[in-house]
Amino acid sequence: MELFKHIEPTAFATVILPLAMPKPLTFHITDELIPRVKFGIRVEVQVGKGRDLYSAVVIGVSSVKPDYATKAITQIIDDEPIISTLQLDFWQWLARYYSCTLGEVMNAALPTNMKLSSETRIVLNPEHNQDFSELNDHEYLVAEALTIQKELTIDQIQKILGHRTVYPLINRLLMLQILDIKEELQQKFKPKIVACVRFKEPYLSDTEGVTMSAIFDQIKNSDKQTNAMLAFLQLIRQQAQNQPVVRCSEIYEKAKTVDLGVLRAIEKKGIFEIYEREVSRIGGYEDELIVDPELSNQQTKAIYDIKKAFETKNVALLHGVTGSGKTRVYTDLMEKAIENGGQVLYLLPEIALTTQIISRLEKIFGDKITIYHSKLNAHERVELWAQAFGGKPIILGVRSALFLPFQNLKLIIVDEEHDASFKQQDPAPRYNARDSAIFLASQYKAKVLLGTATPSVETYSNAQQGKFALVEMTERFGGLQMPDIDIVDMKAETKNKTVVGNFSSRLVEELKAALGRGEQTILFQNRRGYAPTYTCPSCAWTSECKNCDVTLTYHKFTNALNCHYCGYTIKLPKECPACGSKTLIIKGFGTERVEDELKIHLPQARIGRLDLDTARTRTQHSKIISDFENKEIDILVGTQMVTKGLDFENVGLVGVLSADSLLRFPDFRASERAFQLLLQVSGRAGRKHKQGKVLIQAFDVKNLVLLDVQKNNYVSFFNREIAERQEFNYPPFVRLIAINLKHKKPDVLREAAKVFTKLLRGRLGDRVNGPATPLVEWVNTLYILNYLIKLERDTAKLTLAKQIIEEATHELHLLEGFSNVRVAIDVDPY
């Protein structure tokens, strides 16, 4: 009987799962796995009552048994850690500060292919007699496919049947015991393997003289083999290393008539060896490097001031006007950091919008720099993760690059620090990359440089108060003048009937003049599509989304109505669905309509458009920018994409078509965002050889924000804005936490809000504002109510408030009927 005595486990591992669980779980380690389990590796674990398997990251090993029954770790995935203790500290800080779970941070931090999950695979039951005569057509298709492919995923079955609803069918086949379920953890990452070719001995060590003659004697009867050999010799001579790597594909490309069969024939003669080699999916820089231009006096002084500031402060703000040469300052500081063996993280708000900066940095740093962005595929992300772990000197990336496993981080540059794209909106963690970068740098004892022409109010306030160092560049590089900015009175133009479509007569004149001088123009309209509203003048019907409380936007190119919130699309109706009228009209205008009207008024102009519709991929974006840079486009129309990261020497005119729409938004940051956008887009004019011109069309021409933009006066804007923030109790004078509640049923949401409000106000009092209905109260079939909590700038009170919110959320979900109410917490909303 002693043989059957239960043996208590002696070793336990605490792990993080990529799930929104309140705290990490603990699993016991079987004796045979004890020597291999350590911090930072991934292990396979089974979670819940089902058979779902997940990969989890080990964050602690202990002999202390938790006060609940533990399951065993089923398998080890890694031999070496994939994260460091510093990364775990960073994850824990993000979870605490942004009020989310450690699992949600892990889910955001790790590349997809490093987050393994159980995939349900369907197999034939080996005990079934495979008599499928009684099955219907769909059931027979699945069963027959399994006799050929042995196993299928749910996704594959959906594709075979041509529809997504397959669970009832699978359940029936399971009940008939025709199918079985195979559960296993799928390792998604696979290294990229390519076929390569090299000489075999004795040719490997002696490829000159008599030996080469012998080689060609063996292949002289085959023109294809001779061509393959000539191509191979040419390729190895182009490579400088002692052991050149020649891919089979390179030979195919150089010798057009050669294929694998030709190389195999040479291999059979004992000359070649065809072998497989693992290669990186991330291409290296192969062009010639350039030398950075000489520093101007202003740039030299800025670098000196920054270095001096870093002696006493960890964060510096570089406030430089558009075109002042901030990037040259960055490259000098980057060179100094990597010369000392450090790593540099260069953060940009949106990688697809910064093609020119990427190109410039690659030409300076070559293979020392690698790019981390959203367009990388899953395998490339894993490889880049490994590069960062291996000490890659410079990583240029978007906000998620913060999660990479740096070894010796010395400098973080946050370019365009004011940009809202640095703030993650959904899902959690809803972090601000700028603020998170400052914490990350403190872990590595690194420095942070924030750069922009239009600092956020909070950042500039921190600099004014001495928390950050402030370094300013007030002149454009090369002594170029700031653009001449005029505000066009659209109210007067409308009254005088001089408006041409959506253009003022003044803008049309300037467009023609710019074309006549051979100069290019950028036109900014902060709305894509053709028109925002499609309506019936007879009964006032308006096209609305079936999932959201918004009107559908008309897109002329696709002749469809699209929702920019949930993606819902319908074909353009030929008549009014309400009254049957065939006279439907469009109201308002977007970039597509602007492009269309320009072709009518300026038929000789070559027009391009840069928005989310025309530049969905990085390749499409790069093509448009390249065409504009090569002067193949005269007028570039675009949304916010044209306001960032563009530097063209031939732009003489910038036009803003509807400035009022930027200012009339119900948000305390509306003025700040409008000022930043308008000043940034204005900065695209006249950046090289001459002063540019900017025309801003507006109805409210006396708006103080517009006047500050016209004078390029950031300090005036800041002083007025900071006074209003103080008067109405907004950041930087208070801390904000935004909360939204969502549910499919409005009555359930209202009742839940009553309970939630009572729970919050009972402990936070009048700091709680709301619930309020947002501007768009129904999105993707969910109704929304918002709260805004204003807190004193006190760390202890902020921590307590987050704890109260989490407890209120937990209590709400325990009540009957409210468990499905979604609660999203956003600390420091932006």
Image (cartoon, grey):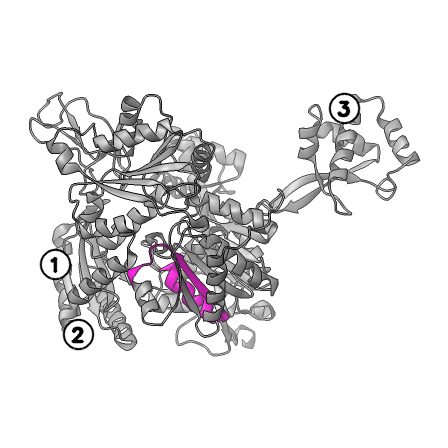
Work out whether 371 lies above or below 816.
above
The front one of 99 and 269 is 99
Q: Quadrant of residue 803?
A: bottom left
Give the x, y percent position of residue 282.
57, 46
Work out whether 380 lies above or below 74.
above
As measured in the structure, the alpha-carbon distance from the residue carrying label 1 to the one carrying label 3 is 79 Å
Task: Give the numbered dot on residue 751.
Answer: 1
Task: Report the amino acid beneath label 3.
Answer: Lys
Left or right: where 239 falls relative to 187: right
As measured in the structure, the alpha-carbon distance from the residue carrying label 1 to the one carrying label 2 is 20 Å
Magenta span covers which residues?
A: 432-457
Q: In what element is the residue under mark 3?
A: helix
Work out whether 346 lies above or below 208.
below
Q: Residue at x 22, y 73 (%)?
A: 792
Which residue is tagged 2? 763
Say which quadrant the N terminus sits in: bottom right
Tell me, yes or no, whether the highlighted magenta stretch contains residue 444: yes
Q: In what element is the residue under mark 1?
A: helix
Give the x, y percent position of residue 59.
48, 69
